[in-house]
Amino acid sequence: MRIYLVGGAVRDRLLGLPVRDRDWVVVGASESVMLQRGYRRADVDFPVFLHPETGEEYALARRETKTGPGYKGFSIDAGPDVTLEQDLIRRDLTINAIAEDETGNLVDPFGGQSDLNAGLLRHISPAFVEDPVRLLRVARFAARLGRWGFRVSHGTQKLLRTMAASAELETLQPERIWQEMKQALPEDQPWRFFQVLHSCGALVRLLPALDRSLPRQDSHVKNAECPMVAALQRAVRQDAGTGVRFAVAFYHAAVTAGDAAGAVGELRVEKPCLELLKLTLRMAPVYREASAGDPARLLELIGATRALHSAAGLKAFLCAADALWPDLAQTHELVLRALDSVAAITPAALQRSGLEGAELGRMLRLKRLEAVRSLMGRAGCG
């Protein structure tokens, strides 16, 4: 029985990046041996076990044979006779097929170290096309490693185009597409996730409205000239969270489609991300008119984001607004100052003067509107 550290942990250590998760492959063992040693079964479909002390995943070395459509259409042989190289060859990219033994020696049968040095995302074997998820994974690695100049090799790009045109692409579930996208959005160059899918022809089938927000491959439009990419780049510079980056990435597609649903399609987006996109789409004209000096619109923005209960929604919107409309960046601070002024005018203070019911509501809005107008006057708006 031999145990090897594999995949991302080895890759990231060789790149000098923080190691996020550690995965292990066990060669020469069976399920019964793992259970006898205290490992716990982690998956009913795959021979993956949890270490009794660390909780890390240890998978039996396995061979896979394509038996049906989709990324679940494989039969698995995880017997003790499966070699390390047979396990590694089933992986997606050469840079993810490097193993390290207990003494720190590297096992690299497919040239992963060479591709790390060359900045190449390269498939291991023609069997790469059998799993459509690998198309999404290549796009995600492009988003993560793009800042170091990593690019998809010509041969792998050719296979991506083949996969994008195949019926296998239709087997990708909306949940899995979102799962990969969600991991790509926080990366250093999230726009590359969409560009890779766009360039191979997959994005137009998976998210057609979003595909239309990227330039044609023969247009020679630079990143800074593409509104969607430029906005996403600004969101990254702001260190914006996943929800903001999602809203920024899909905003232009939603404008073209007429609503958020038309842009997102069947994608199973988490509710906070989708709600922020809807809010950004709905509040865009309100924000622009508030920036032009309309106090009523600024007050409407505060109300629509429920900022008097929690400022989190408003701050997320403002972060998205800064990325989408940099020409209005000065309005960000004004809105936050207006929120402080509005919050200081409470119903309790007016109730003490005898106001109640509809009159209380009318006067509360009037006082808050006066406060915002005064603030905008001092700031030289309008």
Image: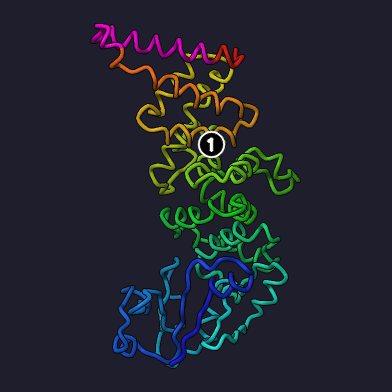
Task: Report the predominant secondary structure element of the magenta stretch.
Answer: helix
Left or right, 37 with reference to 249:
left
| Quarter of the figure that contains the C terminus | top right
Q: Is residue 121 left or right of residue 373?
A: right
Quadrant housing residue 252: top right
Q: Label 1, secondary structure: give it.
A: helix
- Residue 183 appears left or right of 275: right
Residue 76, by quadrant, is: bottom left
Residues 181 and 6: in front is: 6
Residue situated furthest right in the rendering: 220
The residue that appears at 35% across and 76% down in the rendered structure is 50
Q: Which residue is mark 1?
A: 319
Is 285 colored magenta in this rendering? no
Judging depth in this view, the residue of 333 and 102 nearest the camera is 333
Q: Amino acid at mark 1?
A: Cys
Instruction: Locate the N terminus and report the quarter of the image it occupies.
Output: bottom left
| Magenta stretch in the rendered image | 350-375
Q: Residue at x 63, y 81 (%)?
A: 110
Residue 131 position, x and y percent, is: 50, 68
Residue under the image location 34 percent in, 8 percent down: 363
On whether residue 365 falls in the magenta region, the answer is yes
In the image, what residue occupies the spot 28% across and 10% down?
360
Residue 320 in picture, x, y percent from top left: 54, 36
Does residue 379 appear to the left or right of 348 in the view shown?
right
Q: Nearer the viewer, residue 116 or 253?
A: 116
Figure colour scheme: rainbow
Report the number of discs. 1
In the image shown, does 334 or 248 lie closer to the viewer?
Answer: 334
Q: Residues within 10 Å of mark 1 (few under 14, many from 20)?
A: many
Say if 351 sits above or below 99 in the image. above
